[in-house]
Amino acid sequence: MGKGEMERLNQILTGHLTNIHETLQILDQTPASSLRKVSWDEVIKVGEQLSKNATTAGMLFTGEKTKVRALEENMEAYFNGLQGLLLLAYGSTVGAGPTLSSNIHASIKQVVDSSFLLWRECVASYGGPHGSSEQQTTIPRLAGTVWEACSALKKTPATNIVAIGRAMTRIAVSMKDVLREMKELEPCSSDPTGEAESQALESNDVDADDEFGKDLSPEEMKVAQLAIGVVSEAIIVIKELIRSITGLLKKENLRDEQDGVEYLEKLLKLCRSIGVQVDELGACLYPPQEFSAIAESCKEMSNLIDEVGKELDNLNGSIEAFSKGCKSLHNALEMLQIETSASVVADAIPQNSSDMVEQMQNLAVQD
């Protein structure tokens, strides 16, 4: 094809890409409450049509050579559809909180990015040999990426409750990972001489992935077991919180998009903070254990649980199972705090009276 035709195609594509990029920016803005709320089903429907258009674009490079005009027409139809998808997606964010809006933006961005890659390749390939093996593999693959991105729209949460519930579920999964690592901690060998460990090292019978410093003293193991109980109870509380929130829809206490979004987002923020404390707690269990940090983490987690209960009460969503879980978690936290406090005191006391006498004799008395 002529150089002029190729330049024209590139100019047309650049115009489409610029227009879509500018339209995409509106998804970062909060729509006015007076704007018509768009159902996510409408977005999915347009996405399905867009995936068909992507397939059509990929077929342009099979069979007979396509004329420039046909490519231009397909490009225009495709980007008009993509423009419509973005505007509908923006309308679907009416009443959406930050979490739902973030999910929608991420899903739409995947469609846009995959579309850009497809059409850049289509235009770049048009000037090359028609029907080449590269065209017949690269372009259909990119069209398939668009299809996957459009199909993923069906899995995008359509409501605040679903979006926030999924985010809380991910926090619970992360906490389970911490719990699993906690359970891998083991007590130190009963061999007082350490002969068994020394022999294992000398015989190279040690996994290269094994971590040093994971074996705990009996006192540290007791703290670890109590910490395992805390994290187990915390996971239960998060699960019951999710059940409480999803139950609000069934009770019609929450109309999802407008009512209670602020409280739901606060609950998610609190859950994330609890997840951070669980991470901190897990990190403190490796020897030498940081008893003061563990006690501080317990105090912070206890306060966070109280805040969660208050925010859930604001939604009239508290249930008996959640309250029971909070009580069990508070009990587990109290037991761990007591144990760590005792350990801090024990560490501060000299091993025997002779140690104390020696320390007193070493004191310098100033005149």
Image (cartoon, rainbow, N blue to C red):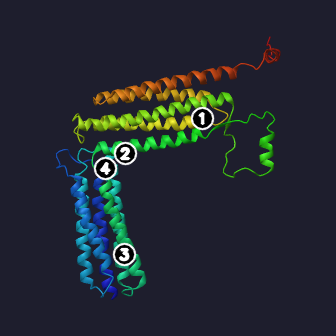
For the residue pair 13 and 88, the one nearer the viewer reads as: 88
Residue 12 visible in rendering: no
Helix, strand, or loop for circle 2?
helix
* 312 in relation to 202, above or below: above
* Residue denoted by label 2: 166
* Quarter of the rendering occupied by the N terminus: bottom left
Say whether disc 4 or disc 1 marks the residue closer to the N-terminus: 4
Classify mark 3: residues with Cα within 10 Å, few (<14), some (14-19) or many (20+).
Answer: many
Say whether disc 2 or disc 1 marks the residue closer to the N-terminus: 2
For the residue pair 107 and 147, the one nearer the viewer reads as: 147
Say whether disc 4 or disc 3 marks the residue closer to the N-terminus: 3
Q: Amino acid at mark 1?
A: Cys
* Residue denoted by label 4: 157
Say whether disc 2 or disc 4 marks the residue closer to the N-terminus: 4
Q: Amino acid at mark 4?
A: Pro
Give the number of marks: 4
Helix, strand, or loop for circle 1?
helix
Label 2 – label 1 distance at C-alpha: 28 Å
Classify mark 4: residues with Cα within 10 Å, few (<14), some (14-19) or many (20+).
Answer: many
Helix, strand, or loop for circle 4?
loop
Label 4 – label 1 distance at C-alpha: 36 Å
* 64 in relation to 53, above or below: below
